[in-house]
Image: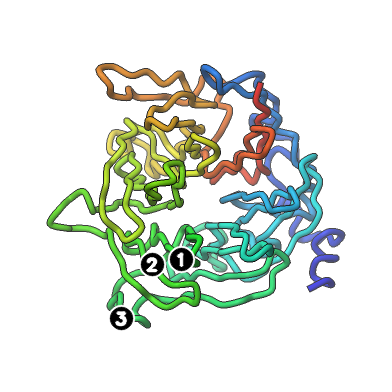
Amino acid sequence: MHGRRTFLRTGILASATAMSAPAFAIGGKHRTEDKGIIGHGGYRYKVDKGWAGTNPFNTFIDNCHEMVQDSKGRLIMIGDDPRNNILVFDKSGKILDSWGTYWPGGHGLTLVDEGGEDMLYVSESGWVKSQKDGRSMIRQNGYVAKTTVDGRLIFTISHPMTAGAYTPDMAFQPTETAVAPNGDIYVADGYGSDYILQYDEYGKFIRKFGGHNNADKNYDLHGAHGIALDYRDATMPKLIVTSRSRQSFKYFTLDGKWLKTVKLANLQVCRPVIHGKNVYAGVCWSHDFGKSDAPKPWLVQTGFTMVMDENDKVISCPGGTEPIYKDGTLQAVAQDAAKTFYHGHDVCIDEDESMYVCQWNGERTPPVKLSRV
């Protein structure tokens, strides 16, 4: 592993540099300048697009999917370029470590303190770039891996048909996990069959809920992209689950009973990230796919980020226009005129209230830092 890390830090492949370098590294004008102050109300931020000290010729980045902060204050990011799936930054943006060569669809990253030791739960989504043309995406089954923060594998959770929870024809492409204090693992099958699957700490299946075509439509999930444990009300812990293509968060009990749905206008949100009393999220798209005349509407870049308070009210959209409510209903929010972001995929909030934004389809750009002002 150490030899591989040394290569990733110092090796430059002459034949690959032109293909691996993002446009901003070779003279393209792709929104590399800072855009001043963004956000609304008490949640406004200074943009720093040059925060990450990455060299595009030997720190290979395709999509920055998610980021977490460990107990040492380091920022750990997962991407889907298997030359270095995991990048570890300090708070100044310097890369401290890189590892992982086995997640071509590396997507979800959850950090859990287990008895004083940080553990990572990685969701391999199963979407893999074609080796034939280097562009098209190939769909295959994914899995969840539990590892230490330096990459030692503990166990994996594979296709739910092995536990009798799925039939063999059902796709399993997990996008996120959440882990309860008792060790129970909740897996969001966001690119597969849209179920939430609950396992015990050893990976033994307990139950599933969500999916499609439930008698009670409140249980239906469409794009179950993210999940988080919500302990803001200590008397009633909950799960927050993303239903991205329905522009909403859904709240469930820890045993899968639906509690409420929070509709988010046109915001196609990714995973919920809880910090203090608020929920933060990346907004991957804000346009209506059905009304887009683009041949591939999911590539249209209309993303930003959002902050939602404890009353389920969106109070700031950094990188977007100001959130407005009429008669208690959130109105449509657009990407800002400066086009600060491409597609907001995830956020990480540190102890200084700074926000680190990971982007999908962001022209191989590293995470952007937003410093709260």
Give the residue pinned by disc 3. 164
Residue type highlighted by circle 1: Ile
Query: Relative to 301, is 167 on the left or the right?
Result: left
Pinpoint residue 15: horizontal percent, then vertical percent: 77, 61
Query: Relative to 204, is 60 on the left or the right?
Result: right
Q: Judging from the image, what secondary structure is the residue with disc 1 in? A: strand
* Depth check, front residue: 294 or 6: 6
Query: Relative to 109, is 309 on the left or the right?
Result: left
Foreground disc of the pair 2, 3: 2
**In the rendered structure, are the residues bearing label 2 and label 3 in contact, judged by CB atoms less than 8 Å apart?**
no
Q: Residue visible at 77% across and 42% down?
A: 93
Pinpoint residue 286: horizontal percent, then vertical percent: 40, 33
Residue type highlighted by circle 3: Gly
Who comes first in sequence, dot 1 or dot 3? 3
Q: Residue visible at 61% across and 76% down?
A: 154
Disc number for residue 185: 1
Quadrant of the drawing holding the C terminus: top right
**In the rendered structure, are the residues bearing label 1 and label 2 in contact, judged by CB atoms less than 8 Å apart?**
yes
Give the residue pinned by disc 2. 198
Q: Judging from the image, what secondary structure is the residue with disc 3 in? A: loop
Disc number for residue 61: none
Q: Is residue 253 above or below residue 367?
A: below
Foreground disc of the pair 1, 3: 1
Q: Residue visible at 74% across and 50% down?
A: 74
* Depth check, front residue: 20 or 79: 79
Q: Label 3: few (<14), some or many (≥20) within 10 Å? A: few
Q: Label 2: few (<14), some or many (≥20) within 10 Å? A: many
Q: Residue visible at 52% across and 19% down?
A: 40
Q: Label 1: few (<14), some or many (≥20) within 10 Å? A: many
Who comes first in sequence, dot 2 or dot 3? 3
CA–CA distance in space, label 1 to label 2: 6 Å
